[in-house]
Image: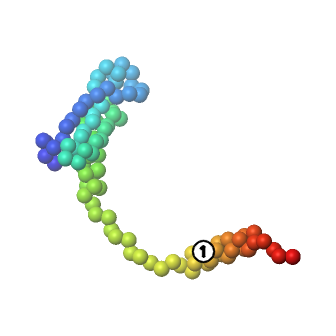
Amino acid sequence: MNEKDIRIDFFRGSGPGGQHRNTSETGVRITHLPTGVMVTATESRSRHQNLQRAMARLEEKLAARSRKKRPRIATRPGKGAIARRLDGKRKQGEKKRARKQVDD
């Protein structure tokens, strides 16, 4: 990953942690500029640890984006699926027949 392709921002993390967390900017936000993918890390009170976590997350997200999805192989519906569909159609037909006007 090229250094020019990412922007690193530091911010104050929210949540528990007391005065140290509230006064120091230890949260890390990394943006991958070519793709716009953004990741954050605020688990630790250490900026260095959060930076490492955010970099690992960014690499993981970019790898997931570049992975190709395998095409779905079309299969015929199974016997159970066919039976359920036909049963539903039969019930719908019975409902419609019950609504028909009866000549006396």
Q: Nearest the camera: 26 or 65?
A: 65
Classed neighbour count for the residue bearing mark 1: other residues with Cα under 10 Å, few (<14), some (14–19), many (≥20) = few
Regarding residue 80, the answer to whether it shows in the image is no
Residue 51: percent from left, percent from top: 24, 37
Regarding residue 25, the answer to whether it shows in the image is yes
Residue 40: percent from left, percent from top: 31, 38
Determine the residue positioned at 64% across, 72% down. 88
Left or right: residue 3 versus residue 54 is left
Residue 15: percent from left, percent from top: 41, 28
Quarter of image, res 50: top left
Give the residue pinned by disc 1. 85
Q: Residue furthest front?
A: 103
In which quadrant is the C terminus drawn?
bottom right
Determine the residue positioned at 25% across, 44% down. 36
Determine the residue positioned at 33% across, 34% down. 42
Quarter of image, res 14: top left
Tag 1: amino acid: Arg
Determine the residue positioned at 24% across, 39% down. 30
Q: How many marks?
A: 1
| Label 1 element class | helix
Judge whether 21 appears above or below 7 on screen: above
Q: Nearest the camera: 76 or 21?
A: 76
Judge whether 10 appears above or below 35 on screen: above
Identify the colour scheme used: rainbow
